[in-house]
Image (cartoon, helix red, strand yellow):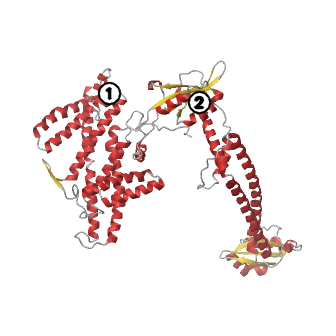
């Protein structure tokens, strides 16, 4: 059902808005509208502009909240605004000091890591690096050379150069090392090595001892830096752990105050001779609006006006759904299609009943139905997935129809069928002959549902005072009479009552079609407007005829679409018969239980998914299209109840 809404205009002194929001509005769910847009006719309105003073502190608290474990227990501790701000600022100061210390250790670690990485390829050099850096008469170059060019260097030009290459390390691609040469030959030697793709690496003058010794010292320093960083991280976590309750309480307080403060974004201001007043506009449920008015009755600084005439309201009322707990998961299907308009029927209960019922008819099996019931219920309990609850409820009807069909995990001889076996039970009909019974019942049930949706369409049209929708539309009274007469005629012919059926066909079948064809001019006449026909009478009647023909085809296609209910019931029985045949259980033999289990799992997964989609298609295309628009907007409370 859709909760009835009231439109409220709330006003008071500008300086009093925080008190009103915190003391009154925070207790209720209110869907706020932009006051400037709603009150267009009011002169001299200005937006309420003010910077949120809680935003920065709240951002700090939010950043620290994200560092807390997700499985922490909720706290009931409460802090005042002053305590919350002071706590967050003190915590931020403490953590900033620790983070600055940590940043110093990280910079230190980066320096050590750089030195560590640069010296590592030269650990094969067995002399003090600092001594090499002090050479006066020899020049040296650290670097690497591709292995193929190193071989060429050794083979062709090494003996002709006045240099010595000391190999330190190598892999499949490169050879690392250092070459020495006399000072006056350095240019020629550098050019020769460069031609061999020697890549020079610059080592800083910061190493002590041999490369192995320097590497070992740097490894120790890296470990020490990592320990210091881990110590800082532990201090941060300790601070957060020791003050979790305070941080939670401060965050909740600041979050609530910030959210309340943001009400100003939708408020407007107006000036009087002495003072500036704010104006808030929004929707409350009828119950909340009455309680709110009662609570503020004795407040001299607050005035609330409740608008009862929808014609004076610019915005369409938002839609707030309220359904019994068992049907609430089916609201997911409603939201997928579109929220109902405020003046529409909420189809949630209708969808819940029809979806579960049709699913059961198409997927009737006691065993597989119980799996759906139990699995869906457990999944919904622990994961709160609405679709799981829907499948659990649909599984109940699968169990019911499983008993009616006499099917348990595909076995049709374990229990007697309380109604029929879908695959084998036939019915003889006049003019048609023998036909599967479930097909006949499916079409009859589909015709019943179409009539019900037509009645719902008429109710929606009455709510919106849509004359064409009430009287002349294909789903209105004329359409209801036409399709109802068609249903009655078919029923009479099928039961052998041809004479009254012909009378119904002539009187109640043709006349509604003519009225539907003339719906536009008839609507204009009823609404006391001039019945003009655009494009001339000839074109109007040609267009109306083809539209009428299309409507008749849609009635037929919508009706025949429900045959899938019987088709899937037969399909399920046939698929399970194949599984039993493969398992060797068709003629009462000893079955292969592995094939039975795997076959049931396959049919359960594949057909359950397909049936679920097909039932949803019936809901959307064959039923919703007749009475439901889904063009509403959802009720979204700006302030949540405390």
Q: Which residue is mark 1?
A: 467
Q: Mark 1 Cα within 10 Å, few/some/many (few <14, many 20+)?
A: some
Front residue (pair 327, 130): 327
Residue 71's spot in the image, x, y percent? 58, 56
Q: Are marks 2 and 1 in contact (CB under 8 Å)?
A: no
| As drawn, 124 above or below 579 | below
Q: Which mark is residue 267?
A: 2
* Nearer the camera: disc 2 or disc 1: 2
Residue 608 position, x and y percent, is 35, 57
Residue 328 versus residue 457 in the image, above or below: below
In the displayed structure, would residue 45 be above or below residue 450?
Answer: above
For the C terminus, give its image quadrant. top right
User: In the structure shown, which secondary structural element does the residue marked by tag 1 occupy?
Assistant: helix
**Which image quarter: residue 217?**
bottom right
Instruction: Tell me: residue 516, above or below residue 188.
Output: above
Question: Can you give x and y, in whole percent of width and height, for residue 566 in the image?
Answer: 25, 53
């Amino acid at each position: 059902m859709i909760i009835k809404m009231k439109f409220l205009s709330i006003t008071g002194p500008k300086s009093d808005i925080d008190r009103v929001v915190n003391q009154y509005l925070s207790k209720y769910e209110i869907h706020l509208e932009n006051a400037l847009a709603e009150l267009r006719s009011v002169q001299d309105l200005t937006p309420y502009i003010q910077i949120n003073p809680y935003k920065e502190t709240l951002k700090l608290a939010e950043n620290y909240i994200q560092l807390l474990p997700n499985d922490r227990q909720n706290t009931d501790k409460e802090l005042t605004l002053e305590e919350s701000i002071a706590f967050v600022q003190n915590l931020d100061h403490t953590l900033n000091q620790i983070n600055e210390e940590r940043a110093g250790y990280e910079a230190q670690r980066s320096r050590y890591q750089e030195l560590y990485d640069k010296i590592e390829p030269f650990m094969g050099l067995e002399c003090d690096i600092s001594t090499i850096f002090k050479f006066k008469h020899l020049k040296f170059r650290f670097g690497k050379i591709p292995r193929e060019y190193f071989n060429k260097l050794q083979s062709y030009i090494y003996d002709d150069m006045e240099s010595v290459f000391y190999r330190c390390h190598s892999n499949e691609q490169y050879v690392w090392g250092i070459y020495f040469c006399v000072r006056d030959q350095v240019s020629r030697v550098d050019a020769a090595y460069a031609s061999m793709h020697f890549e020079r690496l610059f080592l800083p003058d910061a190493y002590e001892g041999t490369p192995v010794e320097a590497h070992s010292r740097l490894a120790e320093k890296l470990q020490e830096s990592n320990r210091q960083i881990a110590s800082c991280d532990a201090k941060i976590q300790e601070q957060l752990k020791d003050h979790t309750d305070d941080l939670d309480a401060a965050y909740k307080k600041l979050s609530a105050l910030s959210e309340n403060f943001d009400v100003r974004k939708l408020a407007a201001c107006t000036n009087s001779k002495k003072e500036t007043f704010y104006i808030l506009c929004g929707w409350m449920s009828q119950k909340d609006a009455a309680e709110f008015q009662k609570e503020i009755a004795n407040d001299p600084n607050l005035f609330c006006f409740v608008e009862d005439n929808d014609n004076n309201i610019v915005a369409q009322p938002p839609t707030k759904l309220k359904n019994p707990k068992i049907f609430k998961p089916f609201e997911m299907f409603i939201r997928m299609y579109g929220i109902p308009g405020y003046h529409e029927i909420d189809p949630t209960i209708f969808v819940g009943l029809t979806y579960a019922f049709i699913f059961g008819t198409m997927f009737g099996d006691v065993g597989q139905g119980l799996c759906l019931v139990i699995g869906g219920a457990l999944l919904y309990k622990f994961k709160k997935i609405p679709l799981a609850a829907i499948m659990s409820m649909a599984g109940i009807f699968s169990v019911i129809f499983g008993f009616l069909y006499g099917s348990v995990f595909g076995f049709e001889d374990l229990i007697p069928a309380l109604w029929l076996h879908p695959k084998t039970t036939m019915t003889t009909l006049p003019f048609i002959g023998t036909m599967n019974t479930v097909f006949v019942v499916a079409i009859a049930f589909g015709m019943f549902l179409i009539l019900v949706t037509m009645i719902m369409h008429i109710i929606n049209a009455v709510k919106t005072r849509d004359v064409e929708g009430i009287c002349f539309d294909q789903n209105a009274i004329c359409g209801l009479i036409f399709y109802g007469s068609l249903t009655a005629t078919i029923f009479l012919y099928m039961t052998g009552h041809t004479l009254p059926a012909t009378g119904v066909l002539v009187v109640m079948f043709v006349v509604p079609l003519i009225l539907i064809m003339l719906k536009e001019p008839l609507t204009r006449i009823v609404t006391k407007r001039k019945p003009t026909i655009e494009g001339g009478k000839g074109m109007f009647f040609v267009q109306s005829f083809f539209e009428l023909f299309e409507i008749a085809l849609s009635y037929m296609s919508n009706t025949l679409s429900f045959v899938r209910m019987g088709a899937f019931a037969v399909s399920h029985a046939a698929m399970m018969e194949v599984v039993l045949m493969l398992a060797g259980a068709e003629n009462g033999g000893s079955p292969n239980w592995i094939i039975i289990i795997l076959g049931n799992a396959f049919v359960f997964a594949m057909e359950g998914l397909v049936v679920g989609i097909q039932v949803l298609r019936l809901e959307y295309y064959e039923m919703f299209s007749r009475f439901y628009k889904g063009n509403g907007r959802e009720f979204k409370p700006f302030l949540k109840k405390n």
